Image (cartoon, rainbow, N blue to C red):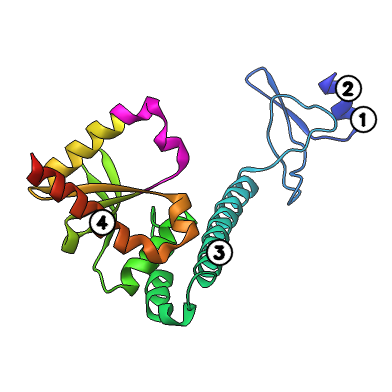
Amino acid sequence: MGYAEAIQDNIPMEKHDGFGWYFPPCRICGSPVSTWSYIRGTEYTCADCKKLLVEEHVKNKKVLQVDKKQKKFDTAIKRISKVTDIAKYKKALEIVQKNLYKAGWFQSTEEIMTAVELIKRGLKINHQVSVYEYSVDFIIPEFKVALEIDGRPFHTKDNEKAQTIRDEVIADKLGEGWNVIRIDTENINTNVTKLVPAIKRILKYREDKKSAV
């Protein structure tokens, strides 16, 4: 099948050590591509062109990732604008935009909104902090808070026990007086301006509860 088709298609052939080699043209540059078999209709690609295709794929993937993050950033601005004057967030937005494309940072629109709100409030934050094998969304030193922004799947009963253990490990590692606080993404999207007051209320509630024991 391959030999007859190669003859009909004028594909160059050679024999080496008893093996037949075919040299169909590269589909991109036309250079001969060495192969043990020839199948009519198959598109062959030389090593150099394969390398270029891989490089182009990586480049396009990076561009796509950048576009996705920019869309999340734009969406964050729109959602914040619905509940407050976005002009007051100019400096905070500039800071987040500058750090938007750091690897592993700002994986969701809600994380962007959270960072913008915390920075606007004058709080120093650290994003995506490694604690043992865990990654914490935000560390807020002033409040001694490890802040996690959770989607609804994290609030299922199946995850509750593992989540509690995780939070205890993180709080213990960070030190005395530290708290892990989880905020639902829905609350962030509804009105992110209530984030800091909510954190303060949770801290006060926990402190009052501890004092009452």
- The residues colored magenta run 149-161
Do labels 2 and 4 touch, CB within 8 Å?
A: no
In this rendering, the label closer to the viewer, 3 or 1: 3
Nearer the observer, 5 or 44? 44
Element marked by disc 2: helix
Residue depicted at 32% across the width and 67% down the height: 118
The disc at residue 201 is 4
Q: Which residue is mark 1?
A: 8
- Where does residue 91 sit, x and y in percent of width and height? 38, 80
Q: Earlier in the sequence, mark 2 or mark 3?
A: 2
Which callout, 2 or 4, points at the residue further toward the start of the chain?
2
Q: Position of residue 117 (x, y in %)?
A: 37, 68
* x and y, in percent, of residue 173 in the image: 13, 43
Residue 107 visible in image: no
Report how far apart the C-alphas of labels 3 and 1 lie in the structure: 58 Å
Residue of label 3: 75
Residue 155 visible in rendering: yes
